[in-house]
């Protein structure tokens, strides 16, 4: 079965600083990979996804993620964080041909002025 | 376009009472998922349906939980009897499965359940 690890429970960054959120997955073949964002009291919204092809994926709100097969990683990045990016971020992995998507435990991002 | 609609948004009940959570998926979507989110366990898949048929209910914690999807536009998650440990946020999500399936889930805003 596939699994996802987000090693950072909580991260604090200054507004304008760069951001990298870590995600490692466990799965034998090439998975589908996702990053979702959850604002307080809201549901999850898709930021970006990887299925195949270019390993650098662009998403909404200026986010990008890079799939590194050798490291089983799919880290999320943003060059300059805005206060409105404060939220919880979830990495998720899916299996081709199967709809079940497994979510990581999330990383809560705090942005300080 | 209307997104996934869940009701109620908040529910406070006493232990032993029956709880029913409702979900209306996005029109045209043919898959529906129920997730539970807690601080301790994160986001867990409880059950999902394809074309109104339950496909995988291995995440349903126990017999007190049941889910139905009588038609393409409505699903319920029922807990009977409820217990304090059922307190959580319950999310419904839908997707369109078929050729070109992208795996993207569209989430509702959740139903926050508190069992006293």
Image: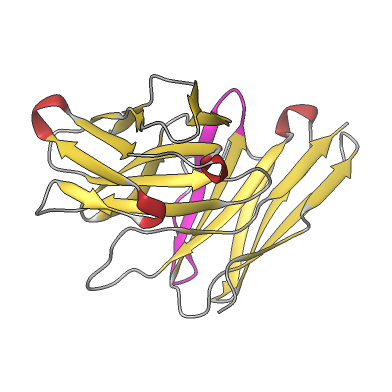
Q: Quadrant of the N terminus of chain B?
A: bottom right
- Image quadrant of residue B7? bottom right
- Image quadrant of residue A35? top left
**On the rendered structure, is A51 left or right of B68?**
left
Judging from the image, the colouring scheme is secondary structure
Residue at 13% in and 46% down = A55
Q: Quadrant of the C terminus of chain B?
A: top right
Residues shaded magenta: B38-56
Residue at 56% in and 69% down = B25
Residue A48 in picture, x, y percent from top left: 33, 52
| B39 within the magenta span | yes
Give the vertical position of B70 relative to A80 (above or below). below
Residue B35 in picture, x, y percent from top left: 55, 46
Give the vertical position of B86 relative to A46 (above or below). above
Q: Dominant secondary structure of the magenta stretch?
A: strand
Number of marks: 0
| B68 within the magenta span | no
Q: Does the rendering let one see residue B8?
A: yes
Residue at 45% in and 73% down = B29
Q: Does the rendering let one see residue B81?
A: no
Along the viewing direction, whichever of B27 and A17 lies nearer the viewer: A17
Give the vertical position of B32 relative to A31 (above or below). below
Along the viewing direction, whichever of B110 and A23 lies nearer the viewer: A23
- Image quadrant of residue B75? bottom right
**On the rendered structure, is A37 left or right of B68?**
left
Residue B98 in picture, x, y percent from top left: 28, 72
Residue A75 in picture, x, y percent from top left: 28, 33
């Amino acid at each position: 079965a596939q699994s996802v690890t987000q090693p950072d429970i909580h991260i604090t960054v200054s507004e304008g600083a760069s951001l990298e959120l870590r995600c490692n997955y466990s799965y034998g073949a090439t998975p589908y990979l996702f990053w979702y964002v959850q604002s307080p009291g809201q549901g999850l919204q898709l930021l970006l996804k990887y299925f195949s092809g270019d390993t650098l994926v662009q998403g909404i709100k200026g986010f990008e993620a890079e799939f590194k097969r050798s490291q089983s990683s799919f880290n999320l990045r943003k060059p300059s964080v805005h206060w409105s990016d404060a939220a919880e971020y979830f990495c998720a992995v899916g299996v081709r041909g199967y709809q079940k998507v497994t979510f990581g435990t999330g990383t809560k991002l705090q942005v300080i002025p | 376009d209307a997104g996934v609609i869940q009701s109620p948004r908040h529910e406070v009940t006493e232990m032993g009472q029956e709880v029913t959570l409702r979900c209306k998926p996005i029109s045209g979507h043919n898959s529906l998922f129920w997730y539970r989110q807690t601080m301790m366990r994160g986001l867990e898949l409880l059950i999902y349906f394809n074309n109104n048929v339950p496909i995988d209910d291995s995440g349903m914690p126990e017999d007190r939980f049941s889910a139905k999807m009588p038609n393409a536009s409505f699903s319920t998650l029922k807990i009977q009897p409820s217990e304090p440990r059922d307190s959580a946020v319950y999310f419904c999500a839908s997707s369109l499965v078929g050729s070109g399936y992208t795996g993207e889930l569209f989430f509702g805003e959740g139903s926050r359940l508190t069992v006293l």
